[in-house]
Image (cartoon, coloured by chain):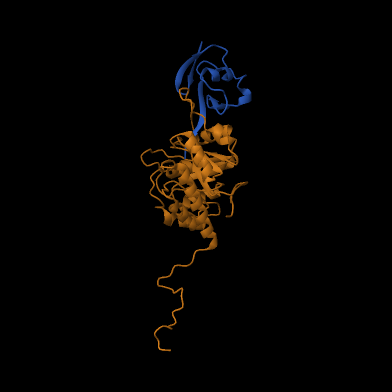
Amino acid sequence: MDSLQLGSYTFSSRLILGTGKFSNADVMLDAVRSSGTQLVTVALRRFNRDMAEDDLFGPLSAMEGITLMPNTSGASTAAEAVRAAHIARELSGSPFIKVEIHPNPQHLMPDPIETYEASRILAKEGFLVMPYISADPVLAKRLEEAGCASVMPLGSAIGSGQGLGTADMLSIIIRESRIPVIVDAGLRSPSEAAAAMEMGCSAVLVNSAVAAASNPPEMAAAFAGAVEAGRRAFNAGLMQRSGSAVATSPLTSFLGTGA
Amino acid sequence: MITIQLNGKQETLPPGSTVETLLPIIGSDGKSVAVVVNDHIVRPENRSSHLLQDGDHIEILVFAGGG
């Protein structure tokens, strides 16, 4: 499989894994390992003195070949997201930032105006900005022009498992985009991840689909296989659809023709 | 004593407290945490010299699971 280029970073895996909602840190780390991912998302939160198992950073940063992509979840304005990005970079040392600004907890849809503004500022500051957006081709183009490293349109609502509901818009974004397009959010099954890759997405980001599986490490491996299959299929070039049957075997009659 | 806001909660500390002396009090070894005082990040190399003042707003942040 060909590699994924984001800024000056090259990744052989095209699966990005989120680390939320796992039953415990060990399961999460097993899933990260079996996914073969090289880029994982983490969130910032307040230190809690009453919780022993607080630190994800230690075990994740000790894993070979893993780059962290902190998100700005919890921010509801561009200013808050920029502040979160600065703090996250201080902690992670990683230039990646997933700009995620969703002010309404009911639907978690990204705020396009605040997301654009935060992304513009952070790209100018040298971050590798990965904005989580609705599947909006106009916004995706504007973010590309603002210097983002990728755009990450949603397949469907975060954590909903409703799959590639935005497929038509994703196709436009992929066709128009000169930066990697990464489907983020809404995927439920590996076949959906494969479908996204076959369409020409550069990578997929999954979290809930793995974390909420009965066996997260096994599901992570399944997604890895699907993402690779989809990418290889895309590179191989899918056949054209035809409105009618096209025979694959010779139809020349030779049985019962009395020859 | 000085009064500070730590992660949204009021705390009292002895005068002369620094970011470095605060961290063990709240059970942090100081690794893998980011410290923000009045919206300014205090980098690890400045923690021992950063004196806390009455009324400071301090945020101590860590990475947690997220998508």
Query: At 54% across and 51% down in the image, what residue appears?
Result: A180
Q: Is residue A72 visible?
A: no
Q: Quadrant of the C terminus of chain A?
A: bottom left
Q: Is residue A183 left or right of residue B17?
A: left
Q: Position of residue A97 (x, y in %)?
A: 54, 40
Front-lying residue, A107 or A144: A107
Q: Quadrant of the N terminus of chain A?
A: bottom right
The vertical placement of A227 against A41, above or below, is below
The vertical placement of A85 against A172, above or below, is above
Q: Residue furthest bottom?
A: A259
Q: Position of residue B35 (x, y in %)?
A: 55, 26
Q: Residue furthest left?
A: A106
Chain that appears blue: B
Q: How many marks?
A: 0
The vertical placement of A85 against A186, above or below, is above
Tint of chain A: orange
Query: At 52% across and 41% down in the image, what residue appears?
Result: A32
Q: Is residue B54 visible?
A: yes
Asked which quadrant contains residue A111, the reply is top left
Q: Position of residue A240 (x, y in %)?
A: 47, 67
Front-lying residue, A28 or A187: A28
Asked which quadrant contains residue B40, the reply is top right
Q: Position of residue A193 (x, y in %)?
A: 46, 52
Query: At 46% across and 57% down in the image, what residue appears?
Result: A171
